[in-house]
Amino acid sequence: MVPTSKGGLFFALGFDVHPLVEGRKLYLGGVEIPYSKGALGHSDGDVLLHSIIDASLSAGGLPDIGTLFPDTDPKYKDIRSTKLLEEAITLLKRKNFTYYQVDLTLVLDEPRISHYYQRIKAELSVLLGIPPERIGLKARRSEGVIFQSERPAIASFALVVLEKIHNDVTL
Ligand code: MG
Protein backbone atom coordinates (compact mmCIF):
# COMPACT_ATOMS: atom_id res chain seq x y z
CA MET A 1 0.00 0.00 0.00
CA VAL A 2 1.25 3.51 -0.80
CA PRO A 3 1.87 5.58 2.33
CA THR A 4 0.33 9.04 2.43
CA SER A 5 1.35 12.06 4.44
CA LYS A 6 -2.04 12.11 6.15
CA GLY A 7 -1.75 8.95 8.21
CA GLY A 8 -4.67 6.54 8.36
CA LEU A 9 -5.11 2.77 8.36
CA PHE A 10 -2.89 0.43 6.36
CA PHE A 11 -3.60 -3.27 6.04
CA ALA A 12 -1.99 -6.35 4.52
CA LEU A 13 -2.19 -10.14 4.53
CA GLY A 14 0.44 -12.54 5.77
CA PHE A 15 0.78 -16.31 5.42
CA ASP A 16 3.18 -18.94 6.72
CA VAL A 17 3.40 -22.71 6.97
CA HIS A 18 5.78 -25.10 8.77
CA PRO A 19 5.95 -28.90 9.02
CA LEU A 20 5.21 -30.40 12.45
CA VAL A 21 7.94 -32.80 13.61
CA GLU A 22 8.93 -34.60 16.78
CA GLY A 23 11.76 -33.17 18.87
CA ARG A 24 10.70 -29.53 18.50
CA LYS A 25 8.74 -27.26 20.83
CA LEU A 26 5.47 -25.82 19.52
CA TYR A 27 5.14 -22.05 19.83
CA LEU A 28 2.06 -20.14 18.73
CA GLY A 29 1.88 -16.40 19.25
CA GLY A 30 4.83 -16.56 21.61
CA VAL A 31 3.11 -19.16 23.81
CA GLU A 32 4.56 -22.65 24.22
CA ILE A 33 1.83 -25.21 23.52
CA PRO A 34 2.43 -28.59 25.22
CA TYR A 35 2.56 -31.18 22.42
CA SER A 36 4.69 -34.07 21.20
CA LYS A 37 5.66 -32.16 18.04
CA GLY A 38 6.74 -28.67 17.10
CA ALA A 39 7.22 -26.59 13.97
CA LEU A 40 10.35 -27.30 11.99
CA GLY A 41 12.14 -24.09 11.03
CA HIS A 42 15.31 -22.02 11.19
CA SER A 43 13.85 -19.95 14.04
CA ASP A 44 11.45 -21.33 16.67
CA GLY A 45 8.92 -21.85 13.83
CA ASP A 46 6.17 -19.74 15.39
CA VAL A 47 3.92 -19.75 12.35
CA LEU A 48 1.38 -17.38 13.92
CA LEU A 49 3.98 -14.71 14.65
CA HIS A 50 5.63 -15.17 11.25
CA SER A 51 2.35 -14.47 9.47
CA ILE A 52 1.77 -11.42 11.69
CA ILE A 53 5.31 -10.13 11.05
CA ASP A 54 5.02 -10.55 7.28
CA ALA A 55 1.62 -8.84 7.14
CA SER A 56 2.89 -6.03 9.39
CA LEU A 57 5.97 -5.41 7.27
CA SER A 58 3.86 -5.39 4.12
CA ALA A 59 1.32 -2.98 5.60
CA GLY A 60 4.18 -0.73 6.68
CA GLY A 61 5.82 -0.74 3.25
CA LEU A 62 8.88 -2.62 4.51
CA PRO A 63 10.74 -5.63 3.01
CA ASP A 64 9.33 -9.09 3.80
CA ILE A 65 10.34 -11.37 6.67
CA GLY A 66 12.64 -13.51 4.50
CA THR A 67 14.52 -10.42 3.33
CA LEU A 68 14.88 -8.83 6.77
CA PHE A 69 15.54 -12.08 8.69
CA PRO A 70 17.02 -14.55 6.17
CA ASP A 71 16.96 -18.21 7.19
CA THR A 72 20.52 -18.51 5.88
CA ASP A 73 21.76 -16.14 8.61
CA PRO A 74 23.13 -18.03 11.64
CA LYS A 75 22.12 -15.00 13.74
CA TYR A 76 18.50 -16.13 13.47
CA LYS A 77 19.07 -19.86 14.10
CA ASP A 78 16.58 -21.02 16.76
CA ILE A 79 15.76 -17.38 17.63
CA ARG A 80 12.44 -16.81 19.39
CA SER A 81 10.04 -15.19 16.95
CA THR A 82 9.01 -12.73 19.65
CA LYS A 83 12.49 -11.19 19.07
CA LEU A 84 11.83 -10.97 15.33
CA LEU A 85 8.50 -9.30 16.03
CA GLU A 86 10.20 -6.80 18.35
CA GLU A 87 12.67 -5.93 15.58
CA ALA A 88 9.83 -5.52 13.08
CA ILE A 89 7.90 -3.29 15.50
CA THR A 90 10.99 -1.12 15.99
CA LEU A 91 11.16 -0.58 12.21
CA LEU A 92 7.42 0.15 12.06
CA LYS A 93 7.59 2.63 14.93
CA ARG A 94 10.28 4.56 13.06
CA LYS A 95 7.66 5.07 10.34
CA ASN A 96 5.05 6.07 12.95
CA PHE A 97 3.02 2.88 12.61
CA THR A 98 1.21 1.33 15.53
CA TYR A 99 -1.10 -1.70 15.61
CA TYR A 100 -4.83 -1.17 15.23
CA GLN A 101 -6.25 -4.69 14.75
CA VAL A 102 -5.18 -8.19 13.74
CA ASP A 103 -7.24 -11.16 12.57
CA LEU A 104 -5.72 -14.63 12.51
CA THR A 105 -6.74 -18.02 11.15
CA LEU A 106 -4.70 -21.14 11.86
CA VAL A 107 -5.00 -24.27 9.73
CA LEU A 108 -3.96 -27.50 11.43
CA ASP A 109 -5.18 -31.00 12.18
CA GLU A 110 -3.27 -31.41 15.42
CA PRO A 111 -3.19 -30.53 18.28
CA ARG A 112 -6.50 -28.98 19.36
CA ILE A 113 -5.68 -25.46 20.48
CA SER A 114 -9.01 -23.74 21.18
CA HIS A 115 -8.39 -23.86 24.95
CA TYR A 116 -5.21 -21.81 24.38
CA TYR A 117 -6.96 -18.98 22.52
CA GLN A 118 -7.26 -16.70 25.54
CA ARG A 119 -3.63 -17.20 26.56
CA ILE A 120 -2.37 -16.57 23.04
CA LYS A 121 -4.55 -13.47 22.69
CA ALA A 122 -3.30 -12.16 26.04
CA GLU A 123 0.30 -12.64 24.91
CA LEU A 124 -0.35 -11.00 21.53
CA SER A 125 -2.09 -8.13 23.29
CA VAL A 126 1.12 -7.40 25.20
CA LEU A 127 3.40 -7.92 22.19
CA LEU A 128 1.34 -5.77 19.80
CA GLY A 129 0.09 -3.18 22.28
CA ILE A 130 -3.61 -3.56 21.46
CA PRO A 131 -6.49 -4.87 23.58
CA PRO A 132 -7.47 -8.56 23.16
CA GLU A 133 -10.81 -7.41 21.71
CA ARG A 134 -8.91 -6.25 18.61
CA ILE A 135 -7.29 -9.64 18.11
CA GLY A 136 -9.30 -12.25 16.21
CA LEU A 137 -8.04 -15.82 16.58
CA LYS A 138 -9.59 -19.02 15.27
CA ALA A 139 -8.47 -22.33 13.82
CA ARG A 140 -9.73 -24.64 11.11
CA ARG A 141 -8.85 -28.28 10.54
CA SER A 142 -7.42 -29.18 7.15
CA GLU A 143 -9.52 -32.39 7.21
CA GLY A 144 -6.58 -34.20 5.66
CA VAL A 145 -7.20 -32.31 2.42
CA ILE A 146 -4.34 -29.84 2.89
CA PHE A 147 -2.10 -31.71 5.34
CA GLN A 148 -1.82 -35.51 5.19
CA SER A 149 -1.67 -37.32 8.54
CA GLU A 150 1.80 -38.71 7.76
CA ARG A 151 3.04 -35.19 6.94
CA PRO A 152 1.40 -32.90 9.52
CA ALA A 153 1.92 -29.17 9.28
CA ILE A 154 0.57 -25.94 10.64
CA ALA A 155 -0.31 -22.83 8.64
CA SER A 156 -1.41 -19.33 9.58
CA PHE A 157 -3.15 -16.49 7.77
CA ALA A 158 -2.91 -13.00 9.27
CA LEU A 159 -4.70 -9.80 8.41
CA VAL A 160 -2.93 -6.88 10.06
CA VAL A 161 -4.28 -3.33 10.26
CA LEU A 162 -1.78 -0.66 11.21
CA GLU A 163 -2.52 2.94 12.12
CA LYS A 164 -0.16 5.65 11.03
CA ILE A 165 -0.28 7.90 14.02
CA HIS A 166 0.87 11.19 12.46
CA ASN A 167 2.72 12.65 9.54
CA ASP A 168 6.07 11.13 8.70
CA VAL A 169 8.33 13.79 7.26
CA THR A 170 10.88 11.17 6.19
CA LEU A 171 8.55 9.69 3.55
MG1 MG B 1 8.02 -19.19 9.07
Image (cartoon, helix red, strand yellow):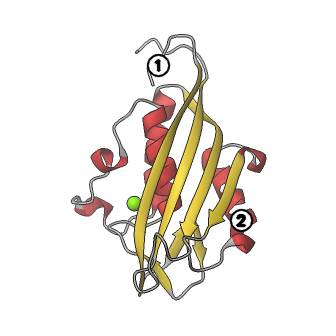
Q: Which residue is mark 2?
A: 117
* Position in image of residue 155 (x %, y %): 48, 63
- The residue positioned 60% from the left and 83% from the top of the image is 34
For the image shown, how many numbered marks are present on the structure?
2
> What type is the residue that disc 1 sits on?
Pro
Whether tag 1 and tag 2 are in contact, CB under 8 A, the answer is no
Q: Give the quarter the ligand 1 occupies.
A: bottom left
Cβ of mark 2 under 8 Å from ligand 1: the answer is no
Secondary structure beneath dot 1 equals loop
From where the camera sits, is residue 85 visible?
no
In this rendering, position of residue 34 left or right of residue 92 = right
In this rendering, position of residue 81 left or right of residue 6 = left
Give whichever of discs 1 and 2 has the lower sequence position: 1
> Residue 77: which quarter of the image?
bottom left
The quarter of the picture where the C terminus appears is: top left
Closer to the camera in the image, 168 or 13: 13
In this rendering, position of residue 87 left or right of residue 162 = left
Secondary structure beneath dot 2 equals helix
Marks 1 and 2, how far apart in space? Answer: 33 Å
* Position in image of residue 148 (x %, y %): 44, 79
- The residue positioned 71% from the left and 71% from the top of the image is 114
Q: Which residue is mark 1?
A: 3
> What type is the residue that disc 2 sits on?
Tyr
- The residue positioned 53% from the left and 53% from the top of the image is 157
> Residue 129: which quarter of the image?
top right
The quarter of the picture where the N terminus appears is: top left
